[in-house]
Amino acid sequence: MANNAAGCPHQPRRVLVLDLDETLVHSVGEDMMRHDSTSDPHGSEVAVLLRPGVQLFLRRMASVYDELVIFTAATREYADAVIEQTLDASGTLLGRRFYRESCDPFQDMAKDLRKLGVPLDSVVILDNSPAAYAMQPLNGVPIPSFTGDPSDRALNEVTPLLLEIARERDMDVRQVIGLHAPSMRPSSSWSSLTSSSSSSSPSRHPFRGAARAALSTFQTHGGSAGSICAPRQRRAVRVCV
């Protein structure tokens, strides 16, 4: 679906690519929802935990980006069910969807952003796995994995950076990420990455090489519920296969 991002037609597009599992939601098997399960042989029921603040986050991003794209390593049946039954029941926030078959099985299920058909200087991807954007590491913004913690506030913390990327339309998104992403993470690892990248060639990026170690450090940074955090939300989703 088309998003309603504000902006002039002549301005460069801004596209935000979003991972699904452990970035926006966390799903668990039928055993946790056994009391709600049915005997329908054509589907299975899973419990979907929404990351705190995810629905407000999506509305805010849809208001400033030209398109929100889901790019997931999950199957089409599962992803469609989660999106249409929990994240975007109205069908007004999220645009195109790319599924497991669009990931590269020979590169740790990496997501090639060139498949979007949009100039890479206009595309940013938010994913809990740096390996997912290994083919275009300059376009990636990491986020800690969400596994159901009701006090998680990572979407709140990453929102200022994503808003900045959307608004700075006279800059390549990769420049904005390179300038601002390290300051979003209170870790000494990011300081060393920033300083080392300043003397490296333009093809190098502070996320490359040490990205996983830095993200691991970021994931240990906790916090109490933030301004957009909501109580833990569990939804039962029926996935037909």
Image: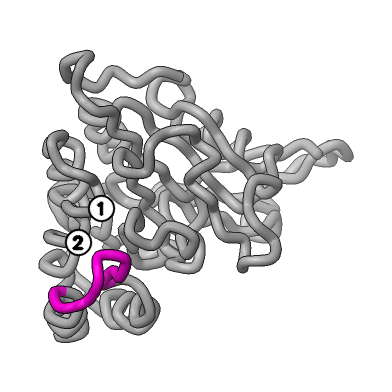
- The majority secondary structure of the magenta stretch comes to loop
| Picture residue at 19% right of the left edge, 46% below the top | 228
- Say which element carries label 2: helix
Disc 1 to disc 2: CB gap under 8 Å: yes
Give the residue pinned by disc 1.
174
The furthest residue to the right = 41
Q: State the image quarter where residue 120 is shown.
A: top left
- The disc labelled 2 sits on which kind of residue? Gly
- Say which element carries label 1: helix
Give the residue pinned by disc 2.
178
Look at the image and give the residue range highlighted in magenta: 198-206
| Picture residue at 85% right of the left edge, 36% below the top | 42
Q: Is residue 170 above or below residue 36?
A: above
Q: Is residue 120 above or below residue 104?
A: above
Way the structure is coloured: one colour
Of 230 and 10, the residue lying toward us:
10
Q: Position of residue 160 (x, y in %)?
A: 13, 49
| Number of other residues with Cα within 10 Å of mark 2, as a class: few under 14, some 14 to 19, many 20 or more | many
Task: Pick the quarter of the image with the C terminus.
Answer: top right
Q: Is residue 232 visible?
A: no
Of 172 and 29, the residue lying toward us:
172
| Picture residue at 31% right of the left edge, 66% below the top | 203
Left or right side of 80 for 126: left
Left or right side of 6 for 55: right
Q: Is residue 112 visible?
A: yes
Q: Is residue 29 above or below residue 230?
A: below
- Magenta-span inclusion, residue 200: yes
Q: Is residue 30 above or below residue 117?
A: below
